[in-house]
Amino acid sequence: MTVIRECVNPECTFRYPDHDSSHPIAYCPKCGQRAEICGIFPESNQLSFLEKKNPSFHLSILLDNVRSIYNAGSIFRTAEGFGIEELFLCGITPTPQHARFSKTSLGAEQHLKWSYHPNAVTLCDQLKKSKTVIISLENSAQATNLYAFQENIFNKNALLVVGNEISGVDPQLLQMSSYIFAIPMAGFKHSFNVATAFGIAVSYFYSLSLS
Ligand SMILES: [Zn+2]
């Protein structure tokens, strides 16, 4: 069950979920006054849909020199949720062997096939020979709007490449790509965080695979 508390201080009113409800009395983490239980809610039931892997979604992921262990772990967690077939970790990308990896992956690596490759270009050469369609996610001049793409190409083997947080996808990998997609941006920033961009793209591709 979920216990919600609220601070009694009318100037504060801080409201938060209490994850340690074994203590009957709790104090506000903001101002230190008493925080009273204002609601106890039953645990919600599991979703009844999308419990099985979509058998017609064949997408693998290449992480090309992703620097941050948190981004790599977060991508693993999202990949696992979408039933991604395989992850290729290239260059400086941290692998699940790193001690802090599971902090953001939450152990998703135990359910995913992954391998490490020092050179992403050599790997993509091999994958292209086995008829894998290479897709890059990159805000470059050659890119087209992700949402303008309407084809379901995911019933055959496709590979999504995401790149380094600063320099993006290796220019030679872009040259080898059949598609380069950019996510349109409405704000002042010119790019999303790499793990967020990955989540946006994989969610969109998943929805295309259902059509
Ligand atoms: Zn308070």
Image (cartoon, rainbow, N blue to C red):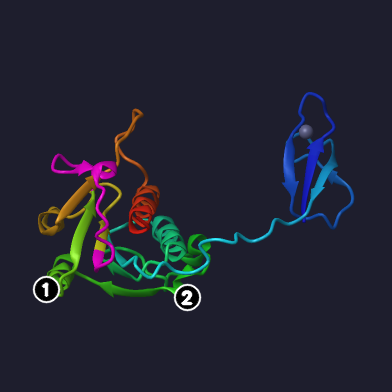
**Ligand 1 within 8 angstroms of badge 1 C-beta:** no
The earlier-in-sequence mark between 2 and 1 is 2
Depth check: give the residue in front, 29 or 138.
138
Residue 187 lies, in percent from the top left, at 36, 29
Mark 2: few, some, or many residues within 10 Å (few <14, many ≥20)?
few
Give yes or no for residue 105 being in the magenta stretch.
Answer: no
- Residue at image position (52%, 62%) is 103
Residue 64 seen in render: no
Residue type for callout 1: Lys
Q: Where's the N terminus, which quadrant?
A: bottom right
**Label 1 crowd (10 A; few <14 / some 14-19 / many >=20):** few
Report the side of 8 relative to 116 (left or right). Answer: right
Q: Which mark is residue 49?
A: none
- What residue is drawn where x is 34% and y is 30%? 186
Q: Is residue 102 left or right of residue 200?
A: right
Q: Point out the stretch of residues depicted in magenta.
A: 138-158
Q: Is residue 204 visible?
A: yes
**Vertical relation: 151 (above or below) 92:** above
According to the picture, the residue beneath numbered tag 1 turns out to be 129
Ligand 1 occupies quarter:
top right
Task: In the rendered view, tell whether residue 73 sits above or below residue 117.
Answer: above
Q: Main secondary structure of the magenta part?
A: loop
Please determine whether, in this image, residue 66 is positioned above or below residue 193. Answer: below
Q: CA distance from mark 2 to mark 1?
A: 29 Å
Label 2 is placed on what type of residue? Gln
Q: Callout 2: helix, strand or loop?
A: helix
Q: Position of residue 69 (x, y in %)?
A: 41, 60
Q: What's the mark number on residue 110?
A: 2
